């Protein structure tokens, strides 16, 4: 009689594969986050959209820069609009600013979402981060956060002709119009902060701290995560009530 080799049992292989996958996942958590147990949010009707570091637009920034890429945010915002399970958005900002056109495009997309949105300025919402922070239905800023308001800058080769300065002025007007249309700050006050001299050591503009941002009408309220969550849930309930009224009519 010949000895027949026993074929491996598929049921015995499955637990081994699961263990291997779990160990790989655990190793990745330790490498990326420095810890094995990471708190995870349950399935929620609220989407968190972080805008961290420098906003990257048409030009790729060096690898050492921490960036939020324009081309990554656009599909997320489209998915938020299309996904019926998502009922609201919280935008978390801790940005130094970045590409003006990319920042304005992101701002317009957030402003035109059909779903309620709330923003929180954490460490800072500087430069082109200002329009993004006011693009939501309601905005919060923590007491220690700051927002730098300054004129539009250009880097690289600049042709010294009147058309260049006209282009910059038009781009600046786009920023001013968006901010004043989506917040309670007046155009005169915003321009005064933008062109102030002596506030910033090596630049024209103003560094606005949390309470001042609320006082000027730039941001709605001082608050953090819990306040933003409460406000967003309130806006979601209001929208549901409005939709139910339309259905009844």
Image (cartoon, grey):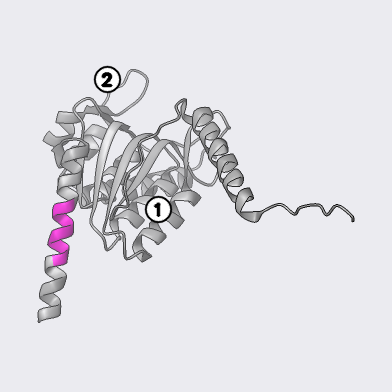
Q: Residue 43 at what x, y percent from top left?
A: 32, 52
Q: Is residue 20 left or right of residue 7?
A: left
Quadrant into which the C terminus falls: bottom left
Q: Is residue 68 left or right of residue 218?
A: right
Is residue 159 positioned above or below 46 on the image? above
Q: Is residue 24 left or right of residue 77?
A: right
Residue most extreme to the front: 1
Q: Is residue 49 left or right of residue 158?
A: left
Identify the residue shown where x is 56% and y is 41%. Answer: 19
Identify the secondary structure beneath mark 1: helix
Identify the residue shown where x is 49% and y is 33%. Answer: 29
Identify the residue shown where x is 58% and y is 32%. Answer: 63
Quadrant into which the N terminus falls: bottom right
Is residue 204 positioned above or below 83 on the image? above
Q: Which residues are magenta?
A: 233-240
In the rendered image, which residue does mark 2 sit on? 198
For the question of whether residue 45 can be seen, the reply is: yes
Q: Residue 101 at what x, y percent from top left?
A: 43, 48
Identify the secondary structure beneath mark 2: loop
Question: Which marked residue is nearer to the observer: mark 2 or mark 1?
Answer: 1
Give the prevailing secondary structure in the magenta stretch: helix
């Amino acid at each position: 009689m010949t000895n027949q080799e026993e074929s491996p049992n598929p049921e015995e292989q499955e637990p081994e594969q699961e263990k291997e996958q779990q160990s790989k996942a655990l190793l990745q958590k330790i490498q990326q986050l420095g810890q094995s147990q990471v708190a995870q949010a349950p399935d929620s009707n609220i989407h968190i959209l972080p805008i961290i570091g420098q906003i990257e637009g048409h030009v790729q920034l060096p690898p050492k820069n921490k960036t939020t890429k324009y081309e990554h945010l656009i599909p997320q915002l489209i998915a938020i609009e299309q996904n019926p399970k998502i009922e609201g958005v919280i935008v978390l900002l801790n940005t130094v600013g970045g590409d003006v056109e990319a920042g304005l495009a992101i701002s317009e997309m957030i402003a035109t979402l059909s779903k309620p949105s709330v923003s929180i300025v954490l460490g800072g919402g500087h430069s082109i981060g200002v329009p993004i922070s006011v693009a939501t239905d309601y905005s919060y800023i923590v007491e220690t956060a700051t927002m730098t308001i300054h004129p539009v800058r250009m880097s690289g080769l600049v042709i010294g002709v009147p058309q260049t300065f006209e282009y910059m002025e038009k781009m600046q007007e786009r920023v001013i119009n968006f901010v004043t249309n989506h917040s309670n700050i007046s155009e005169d006050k915003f321009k005064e902060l933008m062109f102030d001299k002596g506030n910033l050591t090596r630049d024209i503009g103003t560094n606005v701290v949390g309470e001042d941002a609320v006082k000027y009408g730039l941001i709605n309220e001082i608050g953090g995560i819990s306040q933003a969550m409460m406000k967003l849930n309130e806006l979601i309930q209001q929208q549901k009530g409005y939709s139910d009224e339309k259905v009844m009519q």
